Image: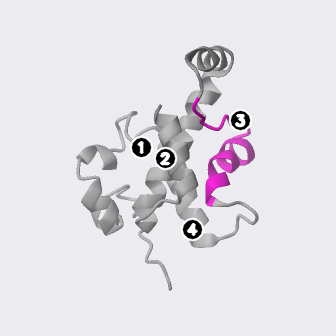
Amino acid sequence: MAINMYFDDEEVGPDRKTSHPHFAAHFKSDFYFDCSDEQAPFGSDEGADVLAELEDFFQDKEVEGVSLSDFPRHVMEDQWELTYYPPKDMDEGSLAKLIAEHERDVWMSDQVVLATAFGQIKITGYIIPELKDMAHDALG
């Protein structure tokens, strides 16, 4: 069974008309389509870049050996040459220490995970369980 995928027009950016109906039905606020709000999934430069990379991933299928759950690591390490810190549930002290030592990469890792999660729903209408769990941890 083929999955209908929805891709944005590069000239317009994220839009309800070019989003999977499930995404548009569940994420009704303009926030989810905002390209200028740094807090929006695709509003930061990183979020916008991840959505574009994810669209390429689904359209071209040229990234061999990379699963959707590994996509955030692939973007951070292989594309941007940064260290990827997978989001995980940890105690406050451990998280504070990690952020103190690697704040930028930890923050960007979370941004990439969230943009990937929202991007998968926007493009395909669903999210794989592992990516959903990663997104929950990134939000925490």
Which is nearer the N-term, disc 1 or disc 3?
A: 1
Tell me which numbered mark, 1 or 4, is placed earlier along the sequence.
Answer: 1
137 to the left or right of 72: left
Q: Residue at x 56, y 29 (%)?
A: 107
Regarding mark 4 in the picture, which secondary structure is present there? helix
User: Residue 35, how many percent across, how many down?
Assistant: 36, 44
Q: Residues within 10 Å of mark 4 (few under 14, many from 20)?
A: some
Among numbered discs 4 and 2, the one appearing first in the sequence:
4
The disc at residue 115 is 2
Q: Dot 1 surroundings within 10 Å: few (below 14), some, or many (20 or more)? A: many
Q: Amino acid at mark 4?
A: Phe
Is mark 1 in CB contact (under 8 Å) with mark 2? Answer: yes
Q: Magenta span covers which residues? A: 68-89
Residue nearest the viewer, comparing 140 with 51: 140
Q: Are marks 3 and 4 in contact (CB under 8 Å)?
A: no
Q: Amino acid at mark 2?
A: Ala
Q: Earlier in the sequence, mark 3 or mark 4?
A: 4
- Establish if 44 lies above or below 98: below
- Residue pointed to by mark 1: 41
Disc 3 to disc 4, C-alpha distance: 23 Å
Q: Earlier in the sequence, mark 1 or mark 2?
A: 1
Q: Which residue is mark 4?
A: 58
The residue lying at 53 percent from left, 47 percent from top is 133
Mark seen at residue 82: 3
What amino acid is labelled 3 in the image?
A: Leu
Q: From mark 1 to mark 3, how far is it between C-alphas?
A: 20 Å
Q: Secondary structure at mark 2?
A: helix
Residue 105 at x, y percent in the picture: 64, 29
Question: Callout 1, which amino acid?
Answer: Pro
Q: Residue at x 45, y 38 (%)?
A: 44
Residue positioned most to the bottom: 1
Q: CA distance from mark 1 to mark 2?
A: 5 Å
